[in-house]
Image (cartoon, grey):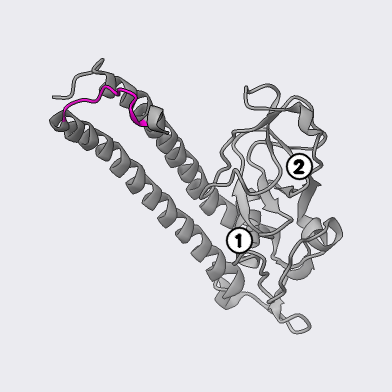
């Protein structure tokens, strides 16, 4: 420790350090503002889902006939998740194939790589058994059960995750259905608490399946919101990369702060 403490370090002057901090703060402020925009967009999409499919205030709901046996609008029914979604349950490869050099596919087997919405790829695997395609919903099947993220890239998935995709190209509807169902970690909408969840239980989770025309109309509205969220997240990634590239250049004096 004394040796480390006595190592010489070249630091910019206090005045330059403050200027550098000001530049970095500008980047951080832009990133945080973009994150706030994403949160507002997500809230709007989830609110619309609740309005249409929980409160049943979908377009033309006033004139929609009700099935007296189900108390649901005509054409709506109660079903299971597997009826509307394809589920792939992860299987972990041997750890000897893991790497941090980018060889193979990004690998996720739990929530370690989760962020606010999209997973962050750090670990890779050169061999894999199960994968999730780009745009898949990643669902944690171990504690915290029901934690959800998305993947922008094709990735390999291990035992702690399931990849979920719509059978009918209505991925946004499926995403907000799951977010509404698992509104808290480990807790499903009916109050059931899970330490883990197996494939049979997840496949047979009960959900309301609306008329496909209503689902497709919702998808038309919300997929635009989700596309905008994707774009804003890409902006954040670019800002973070630019900030991180800039810092060492500012500290070394390669780029002068005016």
**Residue drawn where x is 64% and y is 65% of the image:** 182
**Residue drawn where x is 68% and y is 48% of the image:** 110
Question: In terms of secondary structure, what is the magenta stretch mainly?
Answer: loop
Of 1 and 32, the residue lying toward us: 1
Q: Nearer the viewer, mark 2 or mark 1?
A: 2
Binning the other alpha carbons within 10 Å of mark 2 as few (below 14), some (14 to 19) or many (20 upward) gives some
Quadrant in the rendering for residue 186: bottom right
* Residue that carries the numbered disc 1 in the rendered image: 179
The total number of labels drawn is 2
- Residue range corresponding to the magenta coloring: 5-13
Residue 214 appears anywhere in the view: no
| Location of residue 205 in the rendering, given as x and y in whole percent from the top left corner | 78, 65
- The vertical placement of 258 against 92, above or below, is above
Quadrant in the rendering for residue 258: top left
**Residue drawn where x is 59% and y is 35% of the image:** 121
Q: From the viewer's perspective, is 8 left or right of 158?
A: left
| Location of residue 4 in the rendering, given as x and y in whole percent from the top left corner | 39, 29
Residue 85 appears anywhere in the view: yes
Q: Tell whether position 8 is magenta.
A: yes
* Residue that carries the numbered disc 2 in the rendered image: 158
């Amino acid at each position: 420790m004394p040796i480390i403490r006595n190592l010489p370090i070249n630091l910019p002057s206090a005045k330059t350090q403050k200027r550098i901090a000001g530049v970095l703060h500008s980047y951080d402020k832009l990133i945080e503002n973009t994150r706030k925009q994403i949160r507002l967009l997500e809230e709007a999409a989830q609110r619309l889902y609740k309005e249409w499919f929980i409160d049943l205030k979908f377009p033309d709901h006033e004139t929609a006939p009700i099935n007296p046996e189900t108390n649901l609008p005509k054409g709506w029914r109660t079903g299971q998740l597997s009826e509307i979604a394809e589920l792939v349950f992860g299987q972990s490869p041997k750890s000897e194939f893991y790497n941090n050099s980018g060889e193979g596919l990004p690998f996720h087997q739990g929530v370690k790589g989760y962020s606010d919405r999209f997973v962050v790829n750090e670990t890779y695997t050169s061999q894999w058994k199960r994968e999730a395609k780009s745009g898949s919903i990643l669902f944690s099947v171990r504690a915290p059960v029901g934690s959800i993220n998305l993947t922008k890239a094709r990735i390999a998935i291990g035992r702690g995750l399931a990849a979920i995709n719509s059978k009918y190209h209505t991925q946004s509807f499926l995403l907000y259905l799951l977010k509404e169902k698992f509104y808290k970690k480990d807790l499903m909408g009916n109050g059931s608490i899970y330490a883990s969840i197996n494939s049979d239980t997840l496949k047979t989770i009960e959900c309301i399946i609306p008329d496909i025309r209503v689902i497709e109309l919702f998808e038309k509205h919300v997929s635009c919101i989700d596309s905008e969220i994707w774009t804003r997240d890409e902006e954040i990634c670019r800002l973070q990369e630019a900030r991180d590239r800039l810092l060492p250049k500012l500290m070394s004096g390669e780029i002068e702060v005016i």
